[in-house]
Amino acid sequence: MKRFTIAMAALAVAAVSAGTASAVTTVDGWASSGGANTPATLNTGSSINIDFSWTAAPASGYVQFTTTKAFDVFFTNYFPAVEGEVTGYVLKQAAAGGTTYTTGYDFCSSADTMAAIRGTCDLVAAYPDTTPYPDATEPTTDHTSLFRLDAGTYLLGFKEGGNPSIGQIGFQIAEVPLPAGGLLLLSGLGGIAALRRRRKA
């Protein structure tokens, strides 16, 4: 029993250590076209911030990233804040024929969208009830989590067709914390406490 308890405690510590290791999300590459600038990326450890910007339209671009953990995607910024203007965004699996998770509109289906992300996409807007896209997401107000997806390699991209002709849209890819390691650690510590009580007895 003693050896088993110590082994469980060691396993718990190892699991938590693995869960807090260095970043497991990496940027594999990027591409842009039209008036798009080079995407800006910042790896903060457990998340990566990606900012797309453009100085002329049409413009499109994407970043390919790989993560070995489940992840969420958050909006971080969108400007300029002009009522009635929207920008398309795409999240899809990088593999040929992979699933696309943004399928609301044909906004990104035109020939001036990069082939890798061309097709259906969802929209972001600075104001609610944007005609004719009333359900466009508003990142500057809610920062709502968009997705909870499995580990893998993905493309995250944007498409601006004309307005705003100069702008920026930002995202954060954040690893989903795994609670199992913490529970395992508590189990291991409980076993150690029980062992100590038996020794005292």
Image (spheres, grey):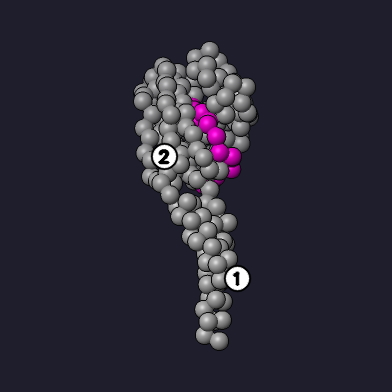
Mark carried by residue 49: 2
Mark 2 and mark 1: span between their CA atoms?
Answer: 47 Å
Q: Is mark 1 on a helix, strand or loop?
A: loop
Percent position (x, y) of residue 3?
55, 67
Q: What residue type is labelled 2?
A: Asn
Left or right relative to 54: residue 8: right
Instruction: Tell whether position 11 is magenta.
Output: no
Frontmost of labels 2 and 1 is 1
Query: Foreground: 114 or 198?
Result: 198
Instruction: Check disc 2 and report its element: helix, strand or loop.
Output: strand
**Considering depth in this image, is 36 or 191 the residue closer to the camera?**
191
Query: What residue is rendered at 50% in x and 38% in y?
Result: 67
For label 2, count other residues whose C-alpha is less than 10 Å away and answer few (under 14), some (14-19) or many (20+).
some
- Taking the spot 63% from the left edge, 28% from the top edge, the residue there is 99
Residue that appears at 41% across and 46% down:
22
Regarding residue 136, the answer to whether it shows in the image is yes
Residue type highlighted by circle 1: Met
Write down the region rendered in magenta.
Answer: 142-158
Question: In the image shown, does 196 or 132 lie closer to the viewer?
Answer: 196
